[in-house]
Image (tube, helix red, strand yellow):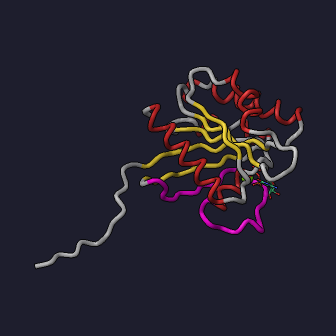
Amino acid sequence: MLCHKPLMLVVKDQYNILCLGLSGSGKSTLLAHLVGETTANIEPTNGFNIKTFPIKGTIVSIKELGGSGRVQNFWDYYFADKNAILFVVNASATEDELRLARETLRTVLSNIRLRGKPCLVLGTHSDVSGAKTEQELDLYFQNIMNGHKWQVLCCSSFDRQQTRSALETLIDLITISGH
Ligand SMILES: Nc1nc2c(ncn2[C@@H]2O[C@H](COP(=O)(O)OP(=O)(O)O)[C@@H](O)[C@H]2O)c(=O)[nH]1
Ligand SMILES: [Mg+2]
């Protein structure tokens, strides 16, 4: 007798990813596009915003924390039990803003609860002329990455293929680093 088993997605694991970055860097926009939502009515994020969805044979739960200075004071409450950091930076920002983003990430990565956790620096706004390239951002961030597996990628937050591919790279970093 022929037995037809239902086709099921075999989910190996769930990864919890923390999505951080300065306000306006593009976190909510790229997360919305990752799950196929419209971005017409995105407001600045107060508190947090979570998206959970399947990708690359696993489930990821990405928690975006609001990026304003006031909310940043509470970021470290959310550092425990995370597998990786997705740090979003507007690659078309001014030098001052990029410097602030770098110092913010330096502080985050020095937190003991995130020791050794992989980090993807995702430069958004690559569709804007004059945006920094991956090579430029790589040089910019390389000195603050002590002991973390990390990589820089650039994308437009509106491009689902680019953002999904970036997330797949982060999942590979998690797998390689054993976190
Ligand atoms: N051109 C362009 N605009 C973007 C991109 N990502 C975000 N934005 C815009 O930047 C603004 C802030 O985005 P938002 O997702 O709210 O940033 P968040 O504060 O980091 O969540 C919005 O007007 C977005 O439409 C991008 O890759 N390219
Ligand atoms: Mg937001």
Give 156 or 69, whichever is nearer the viewer: 156
Task: Using the rendered image of the protein, determine whether residue 52 is visible from the camera's viewpoint.
Answer: yes
Query: Is 125 in front, or is 51?
Result: 125
In the image: residue 178, left or right of residue 72: left
Query: What residue is shown at x 77% (from left), y 47% (from top)?
Result: 25
Q: Position of residue 151 (x, y in %)?
A: 62, 34
Q: Quadrant of ligand 1?
A: bottom right
- Left of 129 or right of it: where is 57? left
> What's the residue at 64%, 60% (across, down)?
160
| Quadrant holding the C terminus | top left
Q: Residue at x 53, y 48 (%)?
A: 168
Write down the quadrant of residue 6 in the picture: bottom left
Residue 146 drawn at (x, y percent): 61, 20
* Closer to us: 69 or 166: 166
Residue 46 appears in the figure = no
Residue 118: x percent and y percent? 55, 33
Q: Quadrant of the N terminus?
A: bottom left
Is residue 80 on the magenta stretch?
Answer: no
Q: Magenta: predominant secondary structure element?
A: loop
Classify residue 121 as left or right of residue 84: right
Q: Name the spot of residue 110 as percent of width and height, x first.
A: 64, 23
**Where is residue 67, by image quadrant?**
top right
Q: Nearer the viewer, residue 111 or 121?
A: 121
Residue drawn 56% across the image and 21% down it: 147
Is 37 a magenta residue?
A: yes
> Could you tell me how many numbered marks the image carries?
0
State the extent of the magenta-drawn residues as a range: 34-56
In the picture as drawn, the residue positioned furthest to the bottom comes out as 1
